[in-house]
Image (cartoon, rainbow, N blue to C red):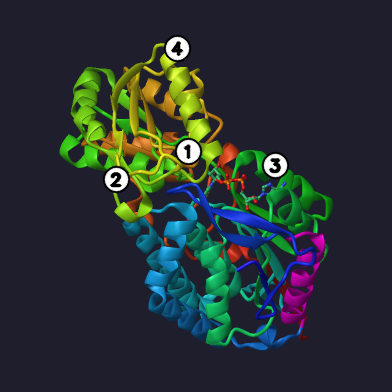
Amino acid sequence: MSTHFINNRRVPGTTGETIPVIDPSDGQVFAQLARGNATDIASAVRAARAAADGGAWSRLAPVERGRLLRKLSDAILAHHDELAMLELRDCGKPVKQAKADATACARYFEYYAGACDKLHGETIPYTPGFAVMTVYEPHGVTGHIIPWNYPMQIFGRSVGGALAAGNACVVKPAEDACLSLLRIAEIAADCGFPEGALNIVTGYGHEAGQALADAAGIDHISFTGSARVGTIIAQSAAKRHVPVTLELGGKSPQIVFADANLDEALPVIVNAIIQNTGQTCSAGSRLLIEASAYERVLSLLAPRFTSLTAGPASMDLDVGPLIRQSQLDRVNGFLSEAQQTKLRIIAQGSVSAEAPSTGFYAKPTLIADVPASASLARDEVFGPVLAAMSFKDEVEAIALANGTEYGLVAGVWTENGGRALRMAKAVKAGQVFINNYGAGGGVELPFGGVKSSGYGREKGFEALYGFSVMKTVVVRHD
Ligand code: NAD
């Protein structure tokens, strides 16, 4: 697989250098990737430009684009298990999660297939003698920088929307998670996508990623990843006045009031921090509990955490391995700090005896009495670690919920309708869930952050406006 995918063909990297691909379940190298650089990015951008600037892709009627996207959706489903198994090995995703991601990727292309011929402008009443219309046009070539935690899902939501709006795409997947996307690009070519519509260059962020952010010929950048790198991307794009969408990190609160229906809330709260081994931008990683229910909720959660087991992806346990050694070191660093600062560790799950010692396994952990100033309450752990704290009333709940640099997602659990609406209004986040969390991740639901969680929206129809440019056409006819 140590090739890029440009102009519907696998092409070797210009330097011949490679990046080892490691299976997080056992820490062993099992494949190599091409280590792309600025030259490889430039050739992918040339291919995309040709497709966007008068090539076959740009000449397709929206309905035909939609048919191709639908064909790709069906083909992803036809290759569903193959793609899921690639991500299982590449990213350490437990079987159910890997399969869910392949299904979601197909669903994105299905959704955006139906949207291609529905993105229309308006006519505007203006001075007599003029006819005015707005039209949505593609940017041209869009660059997509993808993280490793949900490669297929984020590819589907970002590239699916961009293609639907008529752009040609250059994609730089994360160096830890390329295999499924290279395969999907081949499948797209087999479906009949014109040359240059979809190109993938693999490589490190500071090399291929930076080259993509800096490339002349890129008209829009969609970046999903850390806030730190998001700043670098926005700075690069600003030099050429290129618009960006930034989908960054989060430290999302789950806010539990004393009147919450705990039978419904508790399993959702646990799942929101262990899904994908806690490596989810929208993980519910802070648990804010009304003081009068604090100890009761913690004692009910404790056995749920104790019973959790981490193990190899193929065993499909509650939790898989983390993506790589440095991520395991990071998670263990937070756990050591919690011990050193004598935070109350309420419960900890286990690692399966069958897990290879060379894999990257962390124990799911519930920690209580975390001060709002602690790094555990402010920084993304990106692992299965839930930080709990109490609040006395709505005012304090809002202050705590909004008290980090992030604002991606929030969950509110209460049976009081008025309070639910007040909280939905007061919490600064791109999505607020009342008496649920994530809602199954619906592709129809616009998604994105405020503050350091980023700006712009992907998912839903809203994404198509971000992947387009509005043009106003004024015709004088008197
Ligand atoms: P990261 O920022 O390290 O890397 C993301 C991507 O950027 C990778 O493809 C990487 O190779 C590339 N990159 C790194 N340095 C670069 C540079 N200088 N120039 C250009 N590209 C560069 O993030 P990660 O560790 O892969 O992903 C985890 C982060 O992503 C977390 O913060 C998580 O919350 C966030 N995330 C956000 C969303 C969202 O939708 N808001 C979704 C998933 C992940």
The residue depicted at 78 percent of the width and 49 percent of the height is 236
Identify residue type, mark 3.
Answer: Thr
Q: Which mark is residue 341?
A: 4
Residue hosting label 1: 382
Instruction: Compute the Cα span from label 1 to label 4.
Output: 20 Å
Instruction: Compute the Cα span from label 4 to label 2.
Output: 28 Å
Q: Which mark is residue 231?
A: 3
Label pair 1/2, CB-CB below 8 angstroms: no
Q: Counting other residues with Cα less than 10 Å from the Cα at mark 3, is it few (<14), some (14-19), or many (20 or more)? A: some
* Left or right: 145 in relation to 216: left
Q: What kind of element bears circle 1? A: loop
Q: Earlier in the sequence, mark 4 or mark 3?
A: 3
Label pair 3/2, CB-CB below 8 angstroms: no
Identify residue type, mark 1.
Answer: Phe
Which mark is nearer the camera, 1 or 3? 1
In this rendering, the answer to whether 69 lies above or below 93 is below
Highlighted magenta segment, given as a residue range: 36-53
The residue depicted at 67 percent of the width and 43 percent of the height is 229
Q: Earlier in the sequence, mark 4 or mark 2?
A: 2
Which mark is nearer the camera, 4 or 3? 4
Question: Which residue is more in the foreground, 304 or 177?
Answer: 177
Residue hosting label 2: 318
Tell me where residue 390 appears, x and y as whole percent.
33, 19
Label pair 1/3, CB-CB below 8 angstroms: no
